[in-house]
Image (spheres, grey):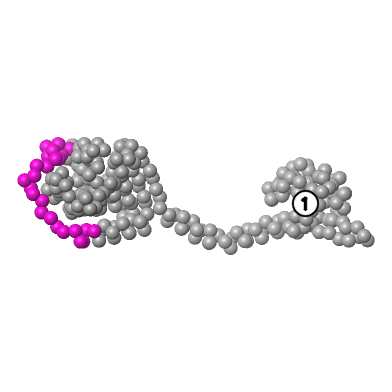
Amino acid sequence: MLNMLEKELEKFGLNDKEAKVYLGLLELSEGSIQDIGKKSGVGRTTVYYIIEGLKLRGLVSEIKKKSKTVFFAEDPRKLEAELDEKKDNLKKIIPELLSITNILDKKPKIRYFEGEEGIKEVYKDTLNYPDQETLAWASQDYSNYFDASFLWNEYLPKRIKKRIWQRTIAPDTKEVRSFADQDEKHLRKTKLVSPEKFPFDVEINLYGKSKIGVMSFRDKIGMIIESEGIYKTLKSIFELNWEYLPEKKYNNSNKSQVPSDMLEESLEQFSQ
């Protein structure tokens, strides 16, 4: 019976020795440190420290009888009152705890991806937002360190089919100019910057009104950051770049490095 009560008292925040001492005092009605030690089976020195702790919790009191100090256990209903007080205190701070939770919910969510397949996952995530616009700082590193056929045979046709428009700031190279010649067909608008002055070692895509896709083709890693605050700041920087970059006419006589028959075939496949 006592063992069961000890276990139940432990659920109310008493450790095993505190439960033994408190139950021993209840049985004794009152007693000295020595009496309590004998009854509870807890060492005398330990009983003294436990009694002090139980006094602070209002579960034990002391009185002087002649020259001797004796202790007695308070009404067990004090435990219920203590629990009620804790509940009341918890109710008071619940709103503050919830406000902290809301702040944590607004912290950026970050996912990391490795290898070429990981980078493809970042691209594929942008396709989950049809009929929207994607903003991109493009890197030409893809041509040396990434599976370009994925971009032309899979990603681009799907982006066009989902009518995801794109504005791109890209390095001013012959290859990029040939792609820019097909901007209208690819639902894209491109502005160019000097790759010598402004090298882009990674590609950054802004999409979905809160997402940032970062791709390092050379390092074979990708990242998706979900944060309205970071998205809005980067979008403002992009718009500032875009506003001050000049419109350029591209030489349509340049032969595109994207095989048009391959793209048409892919578009036909994804339209079925």
Viewer can see residue 93: yes
Q: Residue, x 28% and y 50% (percent of image)? A: 205
- Whether 265 is among the magenta residues is yes
- Report x, y in % for residue 203: 27, 47
- Is 16 on the left or on the right of 271, as rendered? right
- Report x, y in % for residue 18: 76, 49
Q: Residue, x 25% and y 61% (percent of image)? A: 240
- Is 229 on the left or on the right of 6, as rendered? left
- Is 112 on the left or on the right of 93, as rendered? left
- Report x, y in % for residue 157: 19, 42
Q: Amino acid at mark 1?
A: Ile
How many marks are shown on the rendered structure? 1
In this rendering, the answer to whether 131 lies above or below 265 is: below
- Report x, y in % for residue 30: 86, 54
Q: Which residues are magenta?
A: 241-266
- Whether 263 is among the magenta residues is yes
Image quadrant containing the N terminus: top right
Give the residue at the far front of this rendering. Answer: 196
In front here: 11 or 49? 49
Image quadrant containing the C terminus: top left
Secondary structure beneath disc 1?
helix
Q: Residue, x 43% and y 54% (percent of image)? A: 107
Question: Which residue position holds label 1?
Answer: 50
Q: Residue, x 28% and y 46% (percent of image)? A: 201
In this rendering, the answer to whether 53 lies above or below 263 is: below
Give the residue at the far bottom of this rendering. Answer: 92
